[in-house]
Image: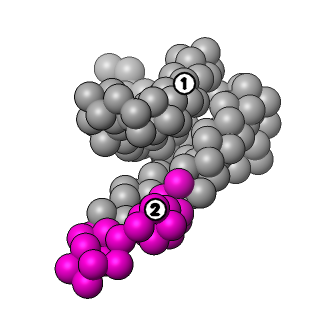
Amino acid sequence: MTALRTIFRYWLWLLLALVVLQIAFAGFGAFDVVDKLGSGAVDEESFEDSWGLHIGFGYLILLGALLALILALVARVGRRSVFHALGIFGLVIVQVLLAWIGGTVPIVGALHPINAFLILGAVGWLTMKQWKGAQMAATPAAPPPPAA
């Protein structure tokens, strides 16, 4: 189980980096469209091209969150951490739904970036918790004080 817990911790680091990269891809998509607007070259296809990386990468994060949940279950990291991983997976599913619905209902789409930061915080918190717990487990306990 120790090896699986180590894999889980490293997977969380990777997932955290992927979420940060995904937020950067959203910024790229937005500013790429703005750049294309300046040249008058925005049509539906060029708009989709600008956001393609962000969209495709979002589904990769969905798979990454599912794998994190599976790893949490098989590594036996504790009930709270499993529920936290389940919550992250749920937030990512909500993220996809917000994107789908937000295309036709902009007020719902406005929740998409807010949820992205919830995902970032949740993954960051679980990552920190797992690494801190591993560090505490690796630190030997102090010997008891001598009897007087």
Query: Can you give x and y, in whole percent of width and height, for residue 142 in the image?
Result: 43, 36
Residue at the spot x=63%, y=52% of the render?
60
Secondary structure of residue under mark 2:
helix
Cα distance between the residues tagged 2 and 1? 30 Å
Secondary structure of residue under mark 1:
helix
Magenta range: 31-55
Residue at the spot x=76%, y=47% of the render?
3
Which quarter of the figure has residue 70?
Answer: top right
Which of the two discs, 2 and 1, sits closer to the camera? 2
Q: Which image quadrant: the N terminus?
A: top right
- Callout 1, which amino acid? Gly
| Image position of 64 with respect to 69: above or below | below
Viewer-side residue, 96 vs 77: 96
Which quarter of the figure has residue 89?
Answer: top right
Which quarter of the figure has residue 132?
Answer: top left
Q: Is residue 118 visible?
A: no
Q: Which mark is residue 44?
A: 2
Please tell me whether the stretch drawn in magenta is mainly helix, strand or loop: helix
Question: Farthest residue toward the left?
Answer: 38
| Image position of 38 with respect to 16: above or below | below
